[in-house]
Image (tube, grey):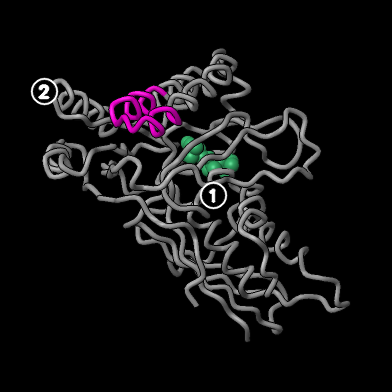
Amino acid sequence: MTSARAIAHPNIALAKYWGKQNGPGNYPAVPSLSVTLDGLATTTKVTLDDSLAKDIATINGQEVVGEPKERIVTLLGLVRAKLSATGETPAFCCVESTNDFPTSSGLASSASGFAALTIAADGAYGTQLPTDVLSDLARRISASSARSFYSDFVVLASGPEAPTGNELLAARPFAERASLPLEVLVAVTTEGAKEVKSTGGMNQTRDKSPVYDAWKNEAPRIFADVKAAIETKSFERLGEAAERSALLMHATMIAGGLVYWNAGTMEAMHTVRKLRAKGTAAYFTIDAGPHVKVLVEPENVRAVKAALESTPSVLRVLRATLGDGARLVS
Ligand code: DP6
């Protein structure tokens, strides 16, 4: 039996992606810029098995069923479609994935999960596709996962306005970690999975939020500001732009009736703002879940971590530095 194992890290967007272009192919409506994290990881093993009548998948030992399983099978189908025609039908496979952090709760487990799955499937099926093609395939299932193929600061452009579905859109590396040293502290505010997945949440926002167009117009400007902050090596400018991106994205969701926050989210945001008022440069960002990710310069990690840990509804605090892109490990 042929197998391959890959590791991938989640990424956290500083300039957020929220919303899709109309048409096929899961193309983002706005550009995004992320950091790939070290310290949190998904490891995925794909084993081809001629005796299987369908693909099977587990995450942390639990069988995956329903819509999450369909997304995995769709991705595997995209990789298998790249096999040169030999006349033989490729074998189905067994996917075993483990996350060392909460799954499906706004900690970007789908980003690391689909990046690791794509690399492991490419290894097991022997397709040997270039990284940009793998990033494009994964983007079709989970757009943020396209960014986890690359290290450090990574960009994903918006897609064409009327995509046919055939356009290649991969993420690309933007800058190395040394250009602007920072760490990310994750204030975990629940151990549970989120109730509304990103794709459904984006559709709800498009259909119900009266300020969705304002978000789509403003997001490219915030993206440009985040890029300029990295280029000019300004941590404060980066943090302010990242906070603006997260707040505008959540304001847009909330206006459409979608609230991902819990009490701990609000408390952690206030902790960060109080630290800043007292002169510590710390900035928050929040994804499609209730956890608060805090951007901090290395010298302030200890103080900011302690402040988050003493915030009553924060359950625990994870620490991550900037990390490497997804890769095969065996
Ligand atoms: C809030 O990549 O999970 O984390 O493409 O529908 O799978 P789909 O969405 P997904 O959305 C991530 C949204 C976000 C912001 C971001 O990572 O840019």
Q: Is residue 308 visible?
A: yes
* Badge 2 amino acid: Lys
Predominant SS of the magenta segment: helix
Residue 278: mark in rendering: 2
Horizontal arrangement in the rendering, residue 321 relative to residue 43 (left or right): left
Q: Residues within 10 Å of mark 1 (few under 14, many from 20)?
A: many
Q: Is residue 197 visible?
A: no
Q: Residue at x 18, y 24 (%)?
A: 276
Where is 25 relative to 326, above or below? above
Tell me: is circle 1 under 8 Å from ligand 1.
yes
Quadrant position of residue 99:
bottom left
Q: Nearer the viewer, residue 185 or 317?
A: 185
Quadrant position of residue 262:
top left
> Residue tagged by mark 1?
145
* Badge 1 amino acid: Ser
Label 1, secondary structure: give it. helix
What is the C-alpha distance between the residues marked 1 and 2?
36 Å
Q: Residue furthest right?
A: 87
Magenta segment, which residues? 226-244
Residue 166 position, x and y percent, is 79, 45
Horizontal arrangement in the rendering, residue 26 relative to residue 238 (left or right): right
Residue 179 position, x and y percent, is 35, 42
Quadrant position of residue 263:
top left
Label 2, secondary structure: give it. loop
Tag count: 2
Q: Residue at x 56, y 76 (%)?
A: 4
Residue 260 position, x and y percent, is 41, 32
Residue 218 magenta-highlighted:
no
Q: Nearer the viewer, residue 158 or 234?
A: 234
Q: Quadrant of the N terminus?
A: bottom right
Q: Nearer the viewer, residue 203 or 236?
A: 236
Residue 237 magenta-highlighted:
yes
